[in-house]
Image (tube, rainbow, N blue to C red):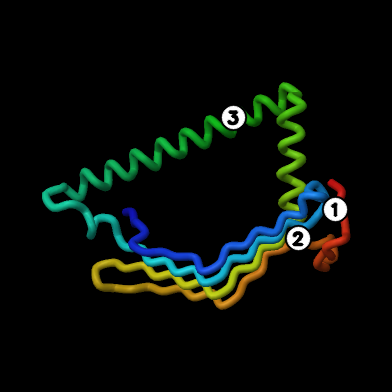
Amino acid sequence: EGFRVKRGSIGLLRLNVPWSRFYTGKLRATIRGVRLEAEQICEVATPGREQEGLIAEIRDAKRKAIDLRMTQLRDLLESAEAGGQGSTLSIRLVRKIVNNIHIELSDIRAAYLNRGLVVGLEVPSLTVLSTDQTFRERSDEEEVNV
């Protein structure tokens, strides 16, 4: 029903933020050498603890997290409907960041252990980037107006 991270590491995490052109420049994130090992939480439970109780506890925590996110979303929508200038500015800033993002992932390895069975995932290289309407990558100098 749940899992926990047993081991993990990141070889390189680089953020390139063009502060002088923050609102229009391309934001770059590079992540390399990620190692992640997760295991089933019920297998690592403390001795004497009932599995059903642990599962109920995990479900309750998930339900509380969902309720918190729903409340935050409701508050965001209400402030946007009220015409708050601060919320409009933050929404526009988030939109600009999403439109100007460039993420490079490489050498990613993850494994999940469950009762002696191991499932692995390896991603040699993956790039997430913003493009124009013709799916052409935007140059660093090009500005996106939203």
As drawn, the label of residue 133 is none
Tell me how far mark 3 sits from mark 2, CA to CA: 28 Å
The CA distance from mark 3 to mark 1 is 29 Å
Where does label 3 land, which residue? 74
Q: Residues within 10 Å of mark 2 (few under 14, many from 20)?
A: some
- Do the residues under discs 1 and 2 have CB atoms within 8 angstroms? yes
State the image coordinates of residue 88 (x, y, percent, origin top left).
75, 32
Marks 3/1 in contact by CB < 8 Å: the verdict is no
| Dot 1: element | loop
- Asked if the residues shown at circle 3 and circle 2 are in contact, with their CB atoms under 8 angstroms apart, the answer is no
What is the x, y in percent for residue 131?
A: 79, 62
Q: Which mark is residue 130?
A: 2
The amino acid type of the residue labelled 2 equals Ser
Which residue is at a point 72% across and 54% down the rendered structure image? 17
* 86 or 71: nearer the viewer: 86
1 or 2: tag closer to the N-terminus: 2
**N-term-proximal mark, 3 vs 1:** 3
Where on the picture, by quarter, is residue 12?
Answer: bottom right
> Where, by quadrant of the figure, is residue 107 drawn?
bottom right
Q: Would you identify the image quadrant in which residue 123 lies?
A: bottom right
Q: Hey, which residue is sitting farthest front in the picture?
A: 20
Q: Which residue is mark 1?
A: 144
Q: Residues within 10 Å of mark 1 (few under 14, many from 20)?
A: some
Q: Nearer the viewer, residue 106 or 137?
A: 106
